[in-house]
Image (tube, rainbow, N blue to C red):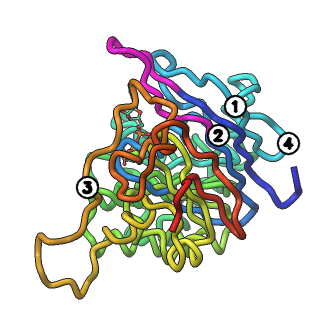
Amino acid sequence: MAETTLLQVNNLRTVFKTDDGLVHAVNGISYKLGYHEAIGVVGESGSGKSVSHLSMLRLIPQPPGKIIGGEVWFEKQNLLAMSAEELRTIRGRDVSFIFQDPMTSLNPFLKIETQMVEGIMLHKKVSKQEAKERAIELFRRVGISEPEKRLSGYPHQMSGGMRQRVMIAMALMTRPKLLIADEPTTALDVTIQAQILELINTLRREEGMSLILITHNLGVVAGMTDRILVMYAGYIVEENTTQELFEHPRHPYTVGLIRSIPKIHEKREGRFYSIPGTPPNLLNLPDACPFYPRCERHKDICKQKMPPLVENGSGRYACYFPY
Ligand SMILES: Nc1ncnc2c1ncn2[C@@H]1O[C@H](COP(=O)(O)OP(=O)(O)OP(=O)(O)O)[C@@H](O)[C@H]1O
Ligand SMILES: [Mg+2]
């Protein structure tokens, strides 16, 4: 692994055992992330964005979930092979995860201060006073007024937008090398969304972190990331630099996602483009392109074998008949 690589995922696979059979949520994804790099992970609901990234840190419920293959190298260690204790250290110190649902990482019974200060003291040699000062500094940075007062309050005393800011501050307490933000702004109104994303971006640059930003909204990642991974049915179907992906998308699914981005000047309400059809059932995934039933360009071969992810210039795509 080159020294510029912070994270390298090799052929990661995750399934869920359900009464109806195995749900194939993540089907062999591989990618690299460099130090200080920001990537976006996009795809419709159910494409495996959350499960793949939770799997990397072994945060999926096991059972019913099971990681059935792969390696996740973080610097020189394989996160999937280390002890639970070693992994907890990395999770608390080097990697922070902002969850899709903010209440999953806030304990309703503990004061915000307790949660922030004790978290960092477990992993870094800092005094209580230093930890509190870092918390106050971060609250200021994320735009929380009266930080001392807020710190002595409880999560339920805050609005959704405030809680999201607390989550970001909390995620940055230990100065992690990697921040994984899973839909950090859903459920917030558009203006606050933009503010929070801008904030994550500024903080990322200042702190020199790498960022994985997960979102179903391709418009959101455009201005914030160096590269984009497009996921469909638990596969990476396309990857490229952000600029190339928007200027020259190859996979028909990516083309559809880009066409679906609402445009501000679009006046005809309710007539936005959306990709026809629905994502496939992950219970029975035949060896075929999972997108072919929704794809105008498909031919017989698309129904017979999943196309391999081929390298092309700065990117990769998995399609027999790319644009
Ligand atoms: N506990 C579970 N049991 C069974 N199936 C699950 C479980 N958790 C997730 N899945 C399935 O795994 C697949 C991938 O889900 P995932 O949450 O990763 O999608 P996503 O891309 O993050 O979608 P969204 O944009 O809605 O957050 C889905 O088909 C989902 O139904
Ligand atoms: Mg998700």
When the figure is inspected, residue 115 is found, relative to residue 321, above or below; the finding is above
Residue 213 placement (x, y as % from top left): 52, 59
Select label 3 or label 1 by which is in front.
3
Nearest to N terminus: mark 3 or mark 2: 2
**Residue beneath disc 1:** 70
Please tell me in which quarter of the rendered image ligand 2 is found.
top left
Instruction: Give the Cα separation between the discs numbered 1 and 2.
Output: 19 Å
Q: Identity of the amino acid at label 4?
A: Lys
When the figure is inspected, residue 239 is found, relative to residue 91, above or below; the finding is below
**Residue beneath disc 2:** 91
Using the image, tell me which numbered label, if any, was put on residue 276: 3
Q: Residues within 10 Å of mark 2 (few under 14, many from 20)?
A: some
Instruction: Give the Cα separation between the discs numbered 3 and 2.
Output: 39 Å
Q: Which residues are magenta?
A: 15-28
Residue 267 placement (x, y as % from top left): 14, 84
Residue 174 placement (x, y as % from top left): 65, 52
User: SS at mark 3?
Assistant: loop
Q: Is residue 51 visible?
A: yes
